[in-house]
Image: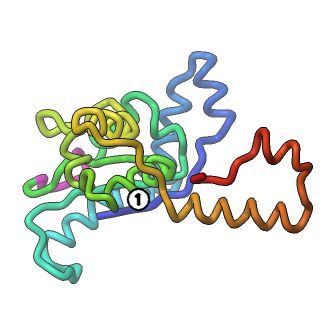
């Protein structure tokens, strides 16, 4: 089960938290990921409710799922920080009525998702394996998805994988810039090299 969430924690909340007011940051996380000001459910509560519908069979799926891996992907880079996922998983588990056949919540940034995709495409490890590597005694790890990818790579002796599709797109953009604006040949030969070359 994937849920994407576009949000940015307000800079004023981050500044106040750095000045010793973690309650402001907690309220910002609550408002953007749990419930908004009007009490409407946000990403974590929406996932908790959706997992119930999937397991009851209210949501049509190709096969009846034996279990559910709830995954929240957000553009909020703060989700990569220590214990952010563990905190949101605690809130998810408080809201989920029945955790039978439901794994802990995995929270990842869009960047971490882009990092994971080439490993999954290369069959180096699956999404489920990545998620399971982060669970301990029914709880989500305090470490980021990036750390889990690193640990799996090194534990399995897997080389670095890159998102070929993105690299090809960046290379095409680079070539367009060269054709449109040109670049001093000395700079091109000494500093800039096309992606993946």
Near-viewer residue (89 or 194) = 194
Q: Which residues are magenta?
A: 93-99
Q: Position of residue 95 (x, y in %)?
A: 25, 51
Residue drawn at point x = 9 percent, y = 57 percent: 101
Above-or-below relation of 64 to 104: below
As drawn, which residue projects farthest toward the top? 20
Are there few (<14), some (14-19), or many (20+) residues within 10 Å of tag 1? some
* 81 sits left or right of 159 in the view: right
What residue does disc 1 label? 41
Near-viewer residue (197 or 157) = 197
> Could you say whether the residue bearing mark 1 is in a helix, strand or loop?
loop
- Is residue 196 on the magenta stretch? no
Residue drawn at point x = 68 percent, y = 34 percent: 12
Q: Position of residue 20 (x, y in %)?
A: 57, 16
Q: Position of residue 151 (x, y in %)?
A: 29, 33
Q: Position of residue 36 (x, y in %)?
A: 50, 53
Residue drawn at point x = 44 percent, y = 49 percent: 115
Q: Quadrant of the N terminus?
A: bottom left
């Amino acid at each position: 089960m994937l849920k994407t969430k576009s949000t940015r924690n307000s800079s004023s909340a981050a500044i106040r938290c750095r000045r010793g007011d973690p309650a402001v940051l907690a309220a910002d996380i609550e408002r953007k990921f749990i419930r908004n000001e009007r009490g409407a459910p946000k990403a974590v509560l929406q996932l908790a409710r959706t997992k119930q519908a999937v397991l009851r069979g209210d949501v049509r799926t190709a096969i009846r799922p034996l279990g559910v891996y709830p995954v929240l992907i957000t553009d909020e880079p703060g989700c990569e920080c220590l214990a952010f996922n563990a905190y949101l998983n605690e809130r998810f588990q408080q809201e989920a009525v029945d955790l039978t056949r439901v794994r802990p919540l995995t929270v990842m940034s869009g960047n971490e998702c882009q990092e994971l995709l080439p490993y999954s495409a290369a069959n180096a490890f699956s999404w489920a394996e990545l998620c399971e590597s982060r669970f301990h005694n029914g709880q989500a790890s305090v470490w980021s998805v990036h750390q889990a990818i690193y640990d799996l790579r090194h534990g399995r002796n897997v080389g670095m994988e890159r998102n070929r599709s993105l690299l090809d797109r960046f290379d095409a953009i680079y070539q367009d810039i060269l054709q449109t604006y040109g670049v001093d040949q000395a700079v091109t030969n000494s500093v800039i090299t096309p992606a993946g070359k």
